[in-house]
Amino acid sequence: MKGTSSMSPVVPKIQVRGLCKSFGKKMILDHIDLDLMSGESFVLIGGSGTGKSVLIKCIIGLLQPDSGEILVDGVNIAKISRHERQSLLSKFGMLFQGGALFDSLPVWQNICFGLMHEKKITKSEAKKIAIQLLQAVNLDAAIADVYPAELSGGMQKRVSLARAIAMKPEVIFFDEPTTGLDPIVSGNINDLIIKCVRDIGASAITITHDLNSLRRIADRVGLLFQGKMIWVGSLAELETTDNPYVTQFINGRADGPFTTG
């Protein structure tokens, strides 16, 4: 049509606007803004207790924000029905810091727990899918019948990653995916995160203190400090910025605004 642009504005996969969350008198998130684009890997950094996990829990619906908006594909999740919200949240996958595997279930049931409950697939179908997912995260099919307690920490992380991608989510959240792992295993997990996210075309938000992991998986980085998103930029900008908070954090210096602010 005449006078109408053929270019539609790109809508972020997730938009967070003015998000606030307090526990009692303590402000954890203070008017946070965040955009996550489709196919983007966004990494959240910051000191312990700065609100990184709280932000993710608000986005996925585990915590209720005090104020602000969260939009998924342009839809404000606070203004839709419970059924519609569940449908939107089904687009999310999560790899928790501790793995959060069910000790009483074998690996294959852990991986396909959501599929069996949401999609109502049979146990035989679920096990076939679980074995395929194990192979996707470089684990042997024989692991399917093993219980989580029998696995190493790195293997448990890979099983948790297989579970996170089982529903083919559009957004995956990773909470400290390499914590407690040696550098070689951490590198393997980082490579698997990149591979799995690319294979399913997902966007990702990762919380990490691991700078090697950050540099391996990030497209953009956001730094949280005292409940505020005080810096956002590309990986290249992270390496060249003179922002004192960023430079103290990535260089691990004892002196700086983190410790004097």
Image (tube, rainbow, N blue to C red):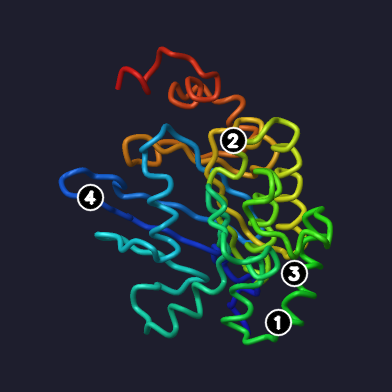
Q: Residue furthest top?
A: 255
C-alpha span from label 4 to label 2? 28 Å
Q: Give the number of the mark in front: 1 or 2.
A: 1
Residue 180 - label: 2
Q: State yes or no: discs 3 and 2 in contact (Cβ < 8 Å).
A: no
User: 51 and 78: which one is in front?
Assistant: 51
Q: Are marks 1 and 2 in contact (CB under 8 Å)?
A: no
Q: CA distance from mark 3 to mark 2?
A: 25 Å
Q: Dot 2 lies on which element? A: loop
Residue type, mark 4 in image: Phe
Q: Which residue is mark 3?
A: 130
Horizontal side of residue 186 vs 14, given as left or right: right
Q: Amino acid at mark 2?
A: Gly
Q: Image point 22% across, 50% down: which residue?
A: 23
Give the amino acid type for the residue marked by disc 3 in the picture. Ala
Residue, disc 1: 123
Which mark is first along the chain, 2 or 4? 4
Circle 1: residue type: Lys
Q: Quadrant of residue 49?
A: top left
Closer to the camera: disc 1 or disc 4? 1
| Disc 4 target residue | 23
